[in-house]
Amino acid sequence: MDERDDSPTVEQAAEAFAAELAYWREVRGLSKRGLALKMGFDPSYVSHVESGRHKPTGDFARRSEETLNAGKALWKRWLDYEAAKNRTAPAAAPPAPRRPEQPYATGSAIIVAHDGARLDFDGTHYGLTMRRLLRNTGSEPITRYLIRISVDRYPGEPERSNAHYREHPLTWDELALTATCHGETMKWQTKHDRDAFKEVWLLFENEQGRFPLYPGEEVWIEYAYSVGEEKWGRWFQRAVRLPTEHLEVELAFPADLDPAVWGTESSMTAEAAPLRTAPIRREEEGMRVFSWSTSTPALHARYRLEWRFRAGPERPTTQREIR
């Protein structure tokens, strides 16, 4: 009898840990060398773990979790890795520890057929609208979808940034998060609520009923929120966490600010390099809009767009990332 096992392999679990480590390192504005030194490891060690040359250890996972304050995300990834190792160990090996909660139900499989982001700046606030076409290629209905919001006021200075957000935390009131599916309002639940980091489950339900995404179906979801300039800034980063067929980003700024935009891409095994194609610029009713897109982006790839305003006073550089 052939039974399907959806559990990650040892290599997949190690890659997932490496991707999580790279994500939190970038959120905290640390270089690989900087993180290694803060953890008390050889300067090259973090690079080796992120590239897959070294596998994570319990001591490394614990120290990275404490240093990056990752809300137990790194520790859970390491438990997944340990569980995967134990599943492939000889029968005499000790039993695998209980695996932590997985994002989606066993048997579910989401593909993002289209992923589009539109970021508008009015001079004081950024407004983000995300549209995603989700396809369920698994065998079970999907009832929720996870999104992430993180900000970092002072990249490269985690202590200063953390102090800033302790005094000025990102709040739900200012975000004013809204979400819809096929025109239906989606309820949402908080998974993590930290000063500079939020994780939210968008639920395929509302007060009128439920509308799960069933196997073989696809549906558009849209969500939007806003953040003041003092907490957002000039760095918008996308990380590919689910198989994605097409990804696009639009940035819209007042034309009188004379904005300039550039970008980089990176992965678990490659340092940041310039985007392979340049953003396309157009004028739109007093706004200057920059568009960039790519097809079949690699899983765990990261695409970052940055900008500056050549007219008007310069403001401190900040960074922003969405998942």
Image: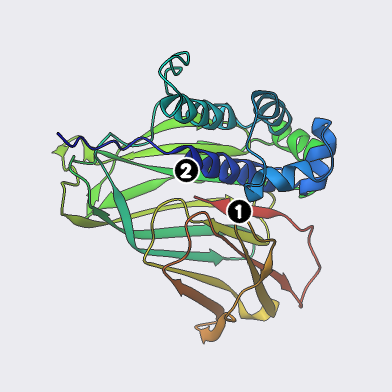
In-front residue for pair 32/70: 32
Secondary structure beneath label 1: loop
Q: Position of residue 146 (x, y in %)?
A: 40, 42
Q: Residues within 10 Å of mark 2 (few under 14, many from 20)?
A: some
Task: Give amino acid for label 1.
Answer: Met
Identify the residue position indicated by label 2 in the image: 12
Residue 62 relative to residue 104: left or right: right
The answer to whether residue 120 shows anywhere in this view is: yes
Give the residue drawn at x 53%, y 30%. Answer: 193
The percent position of residue 196, horizontal first and vertical second, equals 63, 38
Q: Is residue 157 visible?
A: no
Against 207, is 155 above or below? Answer: below
Q: Residue furthest bottom?
A: 282
Instruction: Give the structural element (helix, strand or loop) at label 2.
Output: helix
Q: Nearer the viewer, mark 1 or mark 2?
A: 2
Distance between mark 1 and mark 2 Cα atoms: 12 Å
The residue nearer to you, when weighing 166 against 110, is 110
- The residue lying at 67 percent from left, 57 percent from top is 233
Q: Which residue is mark 1?
A: 268
Picture quadrant where residue 238 is located: bottom right
